Amino acid sequence: MAQPTHPSSTASAPRHIAIIMDGNGRWAKQRSRPRTFGHGEGVEALRRTVEAAGDLGVRYLTVFGFSTENWRRPTEEVSALFDLLRLYVARDLDKLVKEGVRVRVIGERASLQSDIAQIIGNAEAKTRHNDKLNLIIAFNYGGQDEIARAAKKLAADVAANRVSTAEVNAESFARYLDTAEWPAPDMLIRTSGEYRLSNFMLWQAAYSELVFVDTLWPDFDKAALEAAIGEYNKRERRFGGTDPVVP
Ligand code: FPP
């Protein structure tokens, strides 16, 4: 990964960008190819975006790889998405280790196939000393599921008298979320011209700047990321107050 080439864009890059990588199916359909072909090209777009985010000085990049609702898709498509995660890690892990990328995976892990859980654990372990860019892959992730799992852990702590109900507030609750260690996304991008959160980062996106772009995910590249950052830099963030706040 190259050193930042444009100090000005590095200075203005948001610290944390989250992306709903949407439009793989439509991209494939436009080319009369199966949806899984679009997902394969989606991985290429992800590789470009990780590289670009590192070059631009982004510290956290969270991407939506597979949602708790994506199980409703045909079995072949679900297996193709799992295979793509296997392939991505197998092909890119050494490169990610070398380039200072720390990989973390959020989402419900207990019910994942054991080889997937192992691949994820290995990627996290091998990159744990990296700190240039944190690549957070949301896999088998749903915002509502994450909040429910957090509530369950908190309830267990309250029941065991480790936490009192008086101590429960937004800040303490957030420490039970999968994202406890990281700042909230500054910008959330959704590609493909759809305007929904689709159960992604429901808690964390409370004050994220939402940027919707028409580009289908397989066409996303560094220029598209820079354009989204340009849009972000035009926004004034107030976090519910009246004065601009630079987080
Ligand atoms: C949405 O496109 C995309 C997904 C459900 C999966 C995103 C996955 C990747 C980009 C590749 C896999 C990456 C990892 C890390 C596993 P869609 O299929 O909903 O597209 P459509 O709305 O055009 O049908």
Image (cartoon, grey):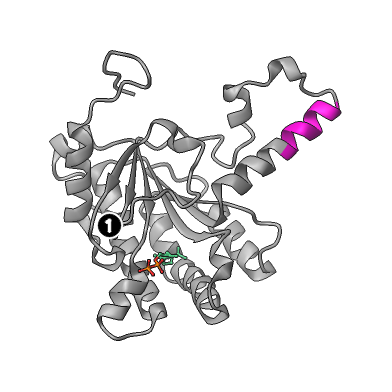
| Secondary structure mostly taken by the magenta-highlighted segment of the chain | helix
In terms of image quadrants, where is residue 152? top right
Q: Is residue 247 left or right of residue 122?
A: left
Nearest the eye: 148 or 125:
148
Q: Dot 1 lies on which element? A: loop
Residue 184 picture location, percent across and down: 44, 34
Nearest the eye: 225 or 35:
35
Give the residue pinned by disc 1.
193
Residue 206 picture location, percent across and down: 44, 32
Q: Is residue 167 left or right of residue 171?
A: right
Who's the residue at 54% across and 78% down the image? 74
Who's the residue at 58% across and 30% down the image? 174
Residue 56 picture location, percent across and down: 23, 44
Point out the image quarter for the C terminus.
Answer: top left
Residue 245, relative to residue 116: is it above or below?
above
Who's the residue at 35% across and 75% down the image? 38
Q: Residues within 10 Å of mark 1 (few under 14, many from 20)?
A: few
Q: Is mark 1 within 8 Å of ligand 1?
A: no
Residue 36, relative to residue 186: is it above or below?
below
Boundaries of the magenta span: 152-160
Point out the image quarter for the N terminus.
Answer: bottom left
Picture quadrant of ligand 1 = bottom left
In terms of image quadrants, where is residue 180? top right
Nearest the eye: 106 or 96:
106
Q: Which amino acid does the dot numbered 1 rest on? A: Gly
